[in-house]
Amino acid sequence: MPRYTEKAVTIGGVDIPANSWLLYGNGPAGHDGEAYDDPERFRLDRDGTRHLAFGKGPHHCLGANLARAEMRVAL
């Protein structure tokens, strides 16, 4: 996902200057061993309140409630 920096920022010890384009992927989201116990294992009993599947804040997915309803019906 391309993003443009408006100001200089440091992420993970890497300095990124202002007015720079950067690319990042959110595929590894939810696989952080520091944030989740056993992140590579599929567990239905895991607390799912911190996932980023539908975004956060102003970028929250408009179809999130529909997707959740469809999942309830499917399961």
Image (cartoon, helix red, strand yellow):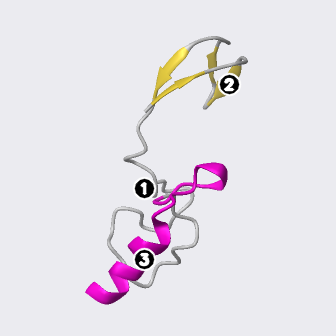
Instruction: Say whether residue 42 is left or right of residue 8.
Output: left
- Magenta range is 53-75
Query: Where in the figure is residue 60, as x and y percent of width and height?
Result: 57, 56
Q: Which mark is residue 68?
A: 3
Q: Which residue is mark 1?
A: 31
Quarter holding the N terminus is top left
Name the quarter where the C terminus is drawn: bottom left
Three-letter amino acid code of the residue under disc 2:
Thr
What is the spatial separation of the Cα atoms under label 3 and label 1, in whole angstroms?
22 Å
Residue in the image at 60% along x and 32% along y: 12
Q: Is residue 67 visible?
A: yes
Q: Considering only vertical position in the picture, is 47 above or below 15? A: below
In the rendered image, residue 26, in percent from the top left (x then y), is placed at 43, 44
Residue 37 percent across, percent down from the top left: 49, 68
Dot label at residue 10: 2
Q: Residue furthest left?
A: 74
Q: CA distance from mark 3 to mark 2?
A: 35 Å
Q: Is residue 60 left or right of residue 7?
A: left
Task: Please state which of residues 69 and 75 is positioned toward the viewer in this rendering.
Answer: 69
Q: Which numbered disc, 2 or 1, marks the residue that appears first in the sequence?
A: 2
Q: Which mark is residue 47?
A: none
Relative vertical location of residue 15 with respect to residue 23 in this rendering, above or below: above
Residue occupying the point 42% across, 55% down: 31
